[in-house]
Image: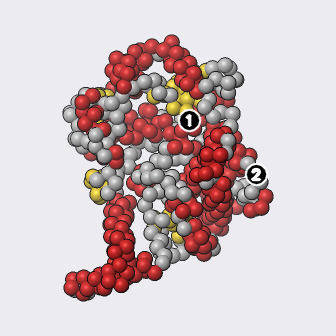
């Protein structure tokens, strides 16, 4: 990574490939770490170099986000040119997703952990999240080469704890709350008060008398926050427990079916000789449409995509209209929408070239490469694996969508998708479908994982593996 002063003048689109390379290979080309055997022989030095690289990226991101927020105030947002506002918002989101990539690396790229701690909460402005003390805290803790700490508020994917920490030299590990100030210190003391119930109540009453109603409300918030945090920690530690955001018991099960990436095929499609438009298919049911003409509006590209698909696979378009009707219009997903799917592995860590990733996110390929998931052919693929893809009624879908959002099953065209075995065991919702569009995982891998789950666990009823 370049030094602090030279980086400041580099536009993000020019800096991004270098940042992506550092994320993908944080130890760089150091000859001591060019094989797994060499890394094992030099594991401490490797860890220190990786931590150093990731810490530099994190501090760089915080600097950029805070600088953009200082410029993009509510009043300035109204006065600045729309194109500049878009660029600044995009840059902020890029830096936040870069921090997501840091979290993925720190936790060993465990997607189930991200799905557990990501609750899709609105992000606060870092400038309103007490940045001074937090930056000082990061500086102090990250001075230890055996430890790395990421500020959760600077991510899009972590809604549990104030920091994400991985340490090989101390007890700080996981998703941790960091509280400062006199009131928070008193609350901390209260929460660890020992003694008979009467003594505890007496100390709480003394606290209320000394600090007033606002402090009591803060105590209530901290207690509820701690309870939720402990419930999430229990799931992460034991792969099961009550999820406070979903308000449901969850069980995390790992699949023996490996994730198969289609990124090499996607890269080859993008690298194909340029034509006005091109349509390709990956793994039978994931359609890729490329139109790099910047003069064509995105809604026109969607229209051209649908027309091309109607010619290439008319049965799929016909099924879409007959089965889901107008409730599910033709929706093509730009590859760069990964930027706004916090559960998904950031595009920076996908098996695509850094320049391609940059061009998709903020360059010549933005609004140019689109995906369409073919449910009709996916149903055939599921059938080939000995199961059936079925759909709920529209009424069931409406009833599901009336529930609080965290408790809803995924719906498509207002209906709930189900994979079921001949013996009656089934899974509703298919919440992992997003991994096909945003994680670069083949549809056949996802289908096989669902069916394996049903055959091994025999779970009847709703499930969110």
User: Which residue matches tag 2?
Assistant: 10
From this view, report whether residue 200 is shown above or below residue 179: below
Q: Disc count in the image?
A: 2
Residue 3 located left or right of residue 337:
right
423 or 92: nearer the eye? 92
The N terminus appears in which quarter of the rendering?
Answer: bottom right
Judged left or right of residue 76, residue 254 is left
Q: Residue at x 28, y 33 (%)?
A: 397
* Image quadrant assignment for residue 426: top left
Q: Nearer the viewer, residue 252 or 182?
A: 182
Looking at the image, do the residues carrying marks 2 and 1 touch, with CB atoms under 8 Å apart? no
Residue at position x 41%, y 37% in the image: 433
Query: Dot 1: what SS?
Result: helix
How many residues crowd mark 2 within 10 Å: few (<14), some (14–19), many (20+)?
few
Where residue 97 appears, as percent x and y from the top left, is 57, 50
The image position of residue 237, as x and y in percent, is: 37, 63
Task: Please state the horizontal and vertical placement of residue 447, each as a whole percent of the image.
Answer: 38, 34
For residue 115, the mark is: none
Q: How far is the residue under mark 2 from the one under mark 1?
A: 25 Å
Please tell me which residue is depicted at 56% across the width and 35% down the height of the picture. Answer: 335
Q: Secondary structure at mark 2?
A: loop
Establish if 216 lies above or below 120. Answer: below
Residue that appears at 67% across and 45% down:
80
> Which numbered circle lies on residue 335?
1
The answer to whether 86 is drawn above or below residue 199 in the figure is above
The percent coordinates of residue 36 (x first, y second) are: 61, 56
Q: Earlier in the sequence, mark 2 or mark 1?
A: 2
Question: Colour scheme of this structure image?
Answer: secondary structure
The residue mark sitting in front, 2 or 1, is 2
């Amino acid at each position: 990574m370049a030094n602090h002063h030279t980086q400041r003048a580099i536009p993000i689109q020019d800096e991004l490939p270098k940042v992506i390379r550092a994320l993908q290979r944080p130890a760089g080309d150091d000859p001591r770490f060019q094989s797994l055997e060499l890394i094992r022989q030099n594991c401490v030095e490797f860890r220190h170099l990786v931590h150093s690289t990731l810490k530099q990226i994190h501090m760089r991101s915080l600097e950029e986000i805070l600088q953009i927020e200082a410029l993009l105030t509510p009043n300035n947002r109204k006065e600045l040119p729309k194109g500049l506002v878009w660029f600044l918002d995009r840059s902020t989101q890029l830096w936040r997703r870069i921090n997501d990539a840091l979290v993925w690396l720190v936790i060993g790229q465990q997607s189930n952990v991200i799905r557990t701690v990501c609750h899709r909460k609105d992000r606060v402005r870092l400038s309103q999240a007490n940045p001074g003390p937090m930056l000082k805290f990061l500086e102090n803790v990250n001075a230890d080469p055996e430890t790395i700490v990421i500020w959760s508020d600077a991510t899009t994917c972590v809604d549990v704890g104030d920091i994400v920490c991985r340490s090989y030299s101390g007890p700080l590990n996981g998703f941790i709350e960091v509280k400062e100030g006199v009131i928070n210190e008193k609350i901390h003391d209260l929460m660890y008060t020992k003694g008979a119930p009467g003594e505890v109540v007496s100390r709480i009453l003394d606290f209320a008398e000394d600090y007033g109603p606002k402090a009591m409300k803060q105590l209530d918030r901290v207690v509820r926050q701690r309870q939720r945090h402990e419930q999430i920690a229990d799931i992460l530690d034991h792969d099961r427990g009550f999820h406070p955001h979903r308000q449901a018991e969850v069980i995390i099960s790992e699949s023996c079916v490996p994730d198969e990436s289609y990124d090499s095929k996607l890269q080859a499609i993008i690298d194909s000789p340029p034509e006005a438009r091109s349509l390709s298919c990956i793994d039978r049911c994931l359609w890729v449409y490329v139109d790099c003409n910047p003069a064509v509006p995105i809604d026109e590209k969607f229209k051209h995509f649908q027309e091309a698909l109607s010619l290439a696979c008319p049965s799929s378009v016909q099924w879409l209209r007959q089965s889901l009707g107008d409730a599910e219009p033709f929706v093509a997903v730009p590859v760069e929408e990964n930027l706004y799917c916090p559960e998904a592995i950031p595009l920076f860590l996908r098996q695509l070239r850094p320049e391609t990733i940059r061009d998709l996110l903020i360059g010549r390929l933005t609004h140019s490469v689109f995906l369409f998931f073919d449910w009709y052919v996916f149903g055939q693929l599921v059938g080939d694996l000995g199961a059936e893809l079925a759909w709920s009624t529209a009424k069931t879908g409406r009833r599901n969508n009336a529930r609080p959002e965290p408790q809803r099953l995924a719906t498509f065209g207002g209906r709930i998708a189900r994979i079921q075995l001949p013996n009656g065991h089934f899974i509703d919702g298919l919440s992992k479908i997003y991994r096909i569009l945003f994680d670069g995982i083949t549809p056949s891998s996802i289908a096989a994982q669902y069916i394996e789950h049903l055959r091994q666990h025999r779970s009847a009823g709703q499930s969110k593996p």
